[in-house]
Amino acid sequence: MSDQTSSFPAEFRAAGTDLSERRRSGVSRGAIVDIDVASAMTEITWDETGAGHIGAFVTIAAIAADARIALNYPAFSAAAAGLATPQIRNVATIGGNLAQRSRCWYYRNPHVACLKKGGPTCPARDGNHLYGVAFDLGPCVTPHASTMAAAILAYDGTIVTTSRPMLQIRNFLGDGSSAQDNSLVPGELITTIQMPPPVPEAGFYKRAISRTHAEWPLVELVTRLSIADGKVRTASLVAGGIAPVPLRLSGAEKVLLGSAISASTIGDACSAAIAAAKPLPMTVYKLQLLRGLMHDVLGRLESNP
Amino acid sequence: MSSATFNGRTESLPADADALLVDVLRDQLHLTGTKLVCGAGVCGACTVLLDGVPVVSCLLPAKAAAGKSITTVEGIGAPRLHPMQKAFMALDALQCGFCTPGFIVEATAFHDLWRAAHGAATPSRDVIGAALSGHLCRCSAYDNIFRAVSEACAGRYDGDVVASPRVEARDKVTGAAKYTVDIKHDGQLEGLVLRSPHAHARITSIDFAPALAIPGVKAAIDLLDSDREVRFVGQQIAAVAAIDRSTAAKGLAAIKIAYSVLPSVIGADAARHASAPLVFTGNATPANASEGTVMRARWKGNVRGPTAAFSQKKKKARAWIAAARAAGDPRLVEGTYRTSIQQHTSLEPHAAVARFDGDRLTIHVSTQSVFELAGKIAKRFKLDRQNVHIVAEHVGGGFGSKGTLGNETMIAIQLARSANAPVRVVFDRDEELSVAGYRPGAEIQVSLLPGADGALKALSMRAHADAGTGVNSMISGLARLIYPAEAKDLVDFDIVSNLPPGAPFRGPGGPPMAFALEQAIDDAALRLELDPIVLRKRWDTNQNRQRLYDWAQGLECWRTIAKPATKTGRYRRGVGVAAGYWLYLWQLNTKVELSVVGGRLSASTAVQDIGTGIRSVIADTVAREFGLEAHEIDVRIGSSNLPEGPTSGGSRTTASVVPPLIQAADKLKAELNKRAGRAPKPGSNAPWRDLIAASPDLRVTAQRGEDDASLARGQRSLLKDAGWIGTIFGWMMRRFSHMAVGAGAPSSVQVVEVEVDTWLGHVRVVQVHTGIAVGRVASMPLARGQAAGSIIQGLGYALYECREVDPKSGVILTAGLEDYRIPGIADTPLIDVHFDEGGFDHVLGGSVGIGEVATVPTAAALANAVYNAIGLRPREIPLRPDRLLSLLEKGSSA
């Protein structure tokens, strides 16, 4: 197997909740690099501006259970509480969550070639892309797997890696035009997630799934809003499960800013959110789900006339 | 070398970076209570505590356990049971038991945290559902799991009382129960299967020498048929046995194969085109996707059929319906329905461990049929039947997929023979979810014509089944045995394509038939402006269901039913009803033995408990006959060396074993009296206990006899209502399947309440009421669990479960539990089970089986409820968010 191993890249291993499955199936065959965990990487600290610094080895469960995180970054906290299963959250790390590989059922099948595995084409594009993207931004039609990346994007957070001290989350993720899941280079490791100083806001996380729990999102929505005098002052909306990268819904944010939240602004925001969508034959429903999620979340803040 | 503490003992950990904790536990430490099911962190069967925190051991690198403390199910409640274990036992929060260790580990951790924080407060259903969302139970014992977790948290199981309606429950909640996958002989090898990467190919050469040259590879065998062709991705080509799994995998990779790729066609829609390549040519024969005998039928391209033996005046039916259609008769109801492929998803995969001792073969198999399997193996491998011993002490689910001589069993035997060593073959989850069988998909066209007098005049049903390389699915034919009409045109077709073959699945053909027919009946009621139950009472003459309709009409939710047109807003509630039946089957030649050995009463027969609880039914029946407690009876099952017992299929076990048990009990009582020289003392509390304790060793046997037709109250075998074809069918079942079709119809009527989220395309099932007539209930808590589990499986079929394939290559994409979505605990509605215990007085003991009839109407009742909620007819299942939203959009633009 050694000749095979050499042609596969080495991979860092955090808790292994993604990697172990790919090792068992044979999708991952390179060397494993277990990480020598510095204690700073397992802690949440707060600087003098009040901003949170989250070590890459902090577990999702620890983030979801942290009271100060919940107070300062409510949408981020809710996203952590809403992903995967309790057992996975208990060990999975935020660094691993950000760097996890695609859940595409072609990518995960060891017998099928695909762009993410160095193959020539995306078999999902002309094949079965039931859970694929509705914003077709690049060669690969599978949505990004990281819920925490969507949440960090909503906060304009920064990633600290072993080689880049200030990697904006949007640059970490890219714009979806490549088949890579992120912009990490071989040997580069996430060490910290740096959140912005907190501001007063309402924050929400909601995912649309077919069952009640424990399912990868068909579509998910991270929402941050602040309202003063009946008008939206700040808005940050990120949709996941719908594009090759978590998608900042800038058009919808523009509609909301300065407006009172009403049925008509929600409708306009939804239209703006999906204006640039390019659904695939099997993914039109994801746009309906995104509208449904926006109605659900924004409707909670609707000002009474 | 690093180490960790396992249930208080320090053990070393392997140095291999790829070693996973689950394998260390199971293979190195023999802690087999921890089960490996999905290998992907979805199902939770492998959950253990790592420093007190629940984690999935299937994804946890062994290295990550270094210096930590691991508690497995074996370490929980040792030496005394944890209150949660007692609650699971007492409230029967388990069936096959394969998921139970994982649930126990998680639930005990939840209990301890909850009690520390909340004292003896009762956690809500939502809290429990979220806490256990990382666990799946395919038997769907969720209803009782909710009860067990909430009652244990409330402190109701803190005492010393340990009791269960399920006799083997203690072994299942402690991880002591051994399943086939847990068997390990000295020198045992691991067998793996090489599978086709092509949907259709001929293998032109195959060279095992490079595989056999690898140290540790002990055997390599060819599994191809004589035509050397494979007809689906995943079809078996060869197998290797080696000292361990990774060596076997290397062996598979080393086999040199040359393929000549042939034209293929994927899926029924593509395969029915006139230009589609033929799947079967020459002498190749498709697999049998049903329990019935494959009869000759016409082929046209890849379409087999029509088979229409259960029609009745079919030309008249066709003519009447055509005339009604031409005339625009408003009473004519027509529609086309589609049902998806449903995977059995037994949590214990197909597995076999074969071991030869000279000419004697002992084989542990995860099977629904220990007795018949021994005969089939003896015949197939030319062994003396006496020298074949099948063992299946515990079976982790079957649902119809483990009823025959399976490939895993044949491969284990061949490898064991070839390697001259014991061999274990255990399917991986991707094999289980692709090549181990499934309920065929179907497209069903229905036309239903009420006459001017309001009676059902004509019914036409044409079903095209999609069972890959399997045939013989019967769906339409089942519509003969419910709702009598003047004329019925019932036609079944199979469409073959280059995909794995289907297999019988709980009520084969029943749920798709009901999905189409019961929605058509609902439509007819709307057209005729009748209450759907009133119309069923008019058209359905069966006396068992008549009683169930009366019960359903009295339900509060049914009486407050609202007209669909009035419903608006995001969330819309609806109520729907559907009826179902199954045949009452029992197995000829079933024998039981009752014995007194050392003063204890023992019952034996070669049946197997796949989670349905037959072991407990036997204990309860014998205990009842002798006025004893169930734990005073030793039940011996799960071995082919015992007296001939029934296959666990066709809902036949209870109706096969209870009557001879009662007969044997009468015989044994006579023997006991004779030896004691006296009858039991009148007025004694336990008259037989003393006689049994004092008795010398005794042994009686009894064989299942025919029912007493004089007690059947005019009921006949359903097949007798189907005319001459029914008679032939019944004869064939007796002759070839050793099954008798008894009098009367096991029946169910279900009323489902749903809430539809029209924004997110989600259906929440609020409550299900199920009325079931299967005679006297042999063991109430277990029957209730079966009924609830059947409903939840039916809801999975209706809402979530769908096999997806790549339309070009034929690769199965839903090959893991992350993508093949079965219901979780939080998807469980409130469940109200009503048993109507009449109708089967002609059966000694009065009981017939429940497993299938209870799942037949569920998807149909749900669809009718959704229609009631949104005024749109869901004609395709599963009703996933994408389908529901598309239906709503079409409805709003119409």
Image (spheres, coloured by chain):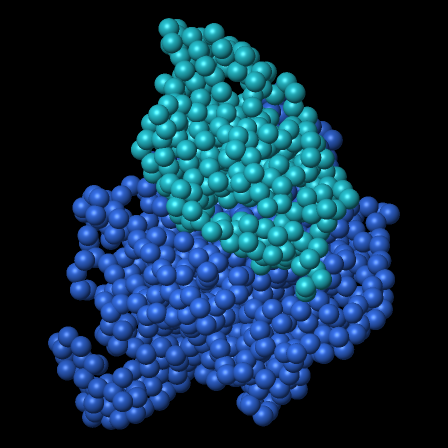
Chain colours: A cyan, B blue
Image-quadrant location for residue A255: top right
From the viewer's perspective, is residue A34 above or below residue B665? above
Report the residue that reaches farthest toward the left: B683
Image-quadrant location for residue A71: top left
Q: Residue A154 or B703: which is nearer the viewer?
A: A154
Can you see residue B77?
yes
From the viewer's perspective, is residue B575 above or below residue B24? above
From the viewer's perspective, is residue B643 above or below residue B80? below
Point out the image quarter for the N terminus of chain B: bottom left
Point out the image quarter for the C terminus of chain B: top right
Which residue shows up at 47% across the image and 17% down it? A235
Q: Residue B836 or B3: which is nearer the viewer?
A: B3
Image-quadrant location for residue B614: bottom left
Residue B199 x %, y %: 76, 56
Residue A77 x %, y %: 40, 32
Which residue shows up at 37% across the image and 53% down it? B54
Which residue shows up at 23% across the image and 74% down it? B628
Horizontal placement of A112 versus B23: left or right?
Answer: right
Q: Residue B131 or B824: which is nearer the viewer?
A: B131
Can you see residue B568?
no
Residue A303 x %, y %: 39, 11
Q: Residue B157 or B547: which is nearer the viewer?
A: B157
Horizontal placement of B417 versus A53: left or right?
Answer: right
Horizontal placement of B351 versus B77: left or right?
Answer: right
Which residue shows up at 68% across the image and 64% down it? A2
Residue B252 x %, y %: 69, 69
Q: Number of labelled discs?
A: 0
